Image (cartoon, rainbow, N blue to C red):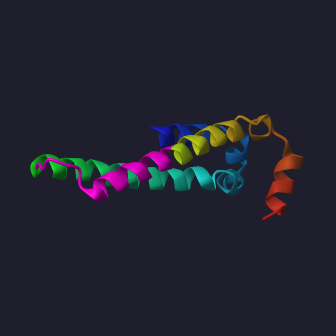
Amino acid sequence: MEYTLFIFIVHATCVYEIGGTQIILRNCKLFLAAILIYFLLSGAQQISYVYMMMYPETYWPEALRTLTCIHRAASLFYYFSTKRTALTLSDPRYYAENIDWIAEQLSNK
């Protein structure tokens, strides 16, 4: 869901329309990495839950307990990066035709 909203927001910026996608991606690398990590951990955790339901035991395996703790820690990182990206993309420089700022950002590769 957040990735879809991110794509819609990126396509609405003036920087994207001019062709400066690398400016946006440079400022949002943390968010894209967080999405990937959170998605993989969520999938692994859900697969572990299904496996545990198929083969019931009286206790949680230590691997599932560890995975749950890692997933919860990664969720903090994920929500922090989502908030940071939303604040970054709400910067008016991305939406106004501020050619000087865009040219400066493109030259700072």
Magenta: predominant secondary structure element?
helix
Query: Is residue 60 within the magenta segment?
Result: yes
Q: Which residue is painted at 60% across and 42% down in the image?
A: 80
Judged left or right of residue 64, residue 93 is: right
How far across and down, in percent of the image, does residue 59 sit?
19, 49
The image position of residue 9, as x and y in percent, is: 60, 37
Residue occupying image coordinates x 72% and y 41%: 14
Task: Please give the count of numbered marks on the rendered protein.
Answer: 0
Q: Residue lying farthest front?
A: 58
Q: Which of 55 and 57 lies nearest the eye of the viewer?
A: 57
Task: Depth check: give the residue in front, 36 or 10.
Answer: 36
Work out whether 91 lies above or below 64.
above
* In the image: residue 56, left or right of residue 1: left
The outermost residue toward the bottom is 109
Q: Specify the quadrant that holds the C terminus.
A: bottom right
Residue 67 placement: quadrant: bottom left
Decide which of 57, 19 is in the foreground and name it: 57
Left or right, 60 with reference to 104: left
Residue at (17, 52) in percent of width and height: 51
List the single residue furthest toward the left: 55
* x then y, percent, for residue 108: 83, 62
Query: Residue 42 at x, y = what percent?
Result: 36, 48
Q: Is residue 38 above or below residue 83?
A: below
Say if the magenta span includes residue 49.
no
Locate the N terminus by quadrant. Answer: top left
Q: Which residues lie in the magenta part? A: 56-75
Taking the spot 53% from the left edge, 46% from the top edge, the residue there is: 78
